[in-house]
Image (cartoon, helix red, strand yellow):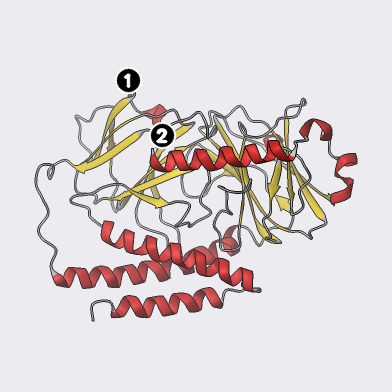
Amino acid sequence: MVTQSFAAALAEAEQIIRSAPHARTERDLAEGLDYLAGSIKASLHLAWAYERDFPFFVASTGPYAKLGLDNPDTLYFHAYIRDDAEYVVTGRRGTTADLSFQVLNGDYSPARSPDSLAAFDDRDIEIAPDGSYELRFGPPRPDAGPNHFALGEGSAMLIAREVYSDWQSERRGEIRIHRADTLGSAPPPVAPDKIAKRYDVAGRILLTRLRTFLAFPEWHYLSLPVNTMTEPRRTPGGLATQYSSVGHYDLDDDQVMVITVPASDAPYQGFQLGSMWYVSLDYINHQTSLTRDQARVDPDGMIRLVVSERDPGLANWIERTGHRRGILQIRWQRLSRELNAGDGPTVEIMPFDELPRRLPHHDRQRVTPDQWRERIAARQTAVAQRMLG
């Protein structure tokens, strides 16, 4: 049967989820099986999108097919490429806080991350007054123009990221890709043996995806002291203008984590929680993330994020949504300078009932239940709009 190998991969994938060390409760397992559903969808999508001669951009992750601690503020797209061909990317710059491109020499695996062969944002390209642009990626050539980028040996994937800071006002752009020498022609019909191969590839993508990103927290987070965050550091993976601060938490329902960080002058600064499955929490229907533009900044220039299970009635409440343990991450993007410890966060744990006494500017942070509903409604409509934009 054509689907036999994929069916076997599905059964193995379910066992990976069920045997995950953090799957301790029925809720943990339900969340993992939901994560599995999105991973199955994405794996089939990616296997059928593996087309280097007639490429197209696909959504790498999204609200219903998450992976890799997906950033709630980012739209991710990728296309498969080869290093001996030339590709043309055309588009129109939107109004998002950042637009960046990256070339990788492979995909993620349980043993290693792919190397970044090139990474830049749109400050490095020429964009017309109407926002349109054309980029070329291909073998090195002496007559290359400013928007030509040489593909290094082993180039296999081109990633584009659009990053929002203000979900309500910023709008996504347009982006397309084609191979320079195949535009106007068509690929050959798909043979039955190729369909069988795609099902096999989808199964291997699924298992690799699950094993890889279950290992990521162990690599990058869980070895750190609990309930702390690191100083800002360059984000692993070659994103030249991005820094991050990371950590993990373990909190009782009567405990609160207050994360204090300066409001940055970088175009993008965002905080999020992640689950032990290494994906974002529900950022559509709950406030599990905040950008600098979304957060309420105190008079001293600080953003004070209140991570709590119980509702403190504050604008900068970050909802744990029942997750006693999880991932903490701050990102800064489109930087024009290096960051240091003074740009990063401090963390304090306190009893929930002590918040009014110990949180600076507590009264200024207060919101009513109706104001909170308005904040959630704004998140829901903004995500719905950008997903269809």
Q: Which mark is residue 130?
A: 1
55 or 371: nearer the viewer = 371
What crowding class fits label 1: few (fewer than 14 Cα within 10 Å), some (14-19), or many (20 or more)?
few
142 or 23: nearer the viewer = 23
Q: Residue furthest top?
A: 129
Please report whichever mark, 1 or 2, sits nearer to the chain's N-terminal start.
1
Amino acid type at image mark 1 = Asp
Compared to residue 283, the image places residue 3 above or below, namely below
* Residue position marked by numbered label 2 in the rendering: 172
Q: Is residue 348 visible?
A: yes
Q: Is there CB contact under 8 Å for labels 1 and 2? A: no
Amino acid type at image mark 2 = Arg
Query: For numbered disc 2, what is the local secondary structure?
Result: loop
The location of residue 114, given as percent across then percent down, is: 41, 56
Compared to residue 253, the image places residue 389 above or below, namely above
The location of residue 184, given as percent across then percent down, is: 10, 42
* C-alpha span from label 1 to label 2: 14 Å
Q: What residue sits 44% from the left and 62% below the top?
A: 38
Q: Is residue 109 visible?
A: no
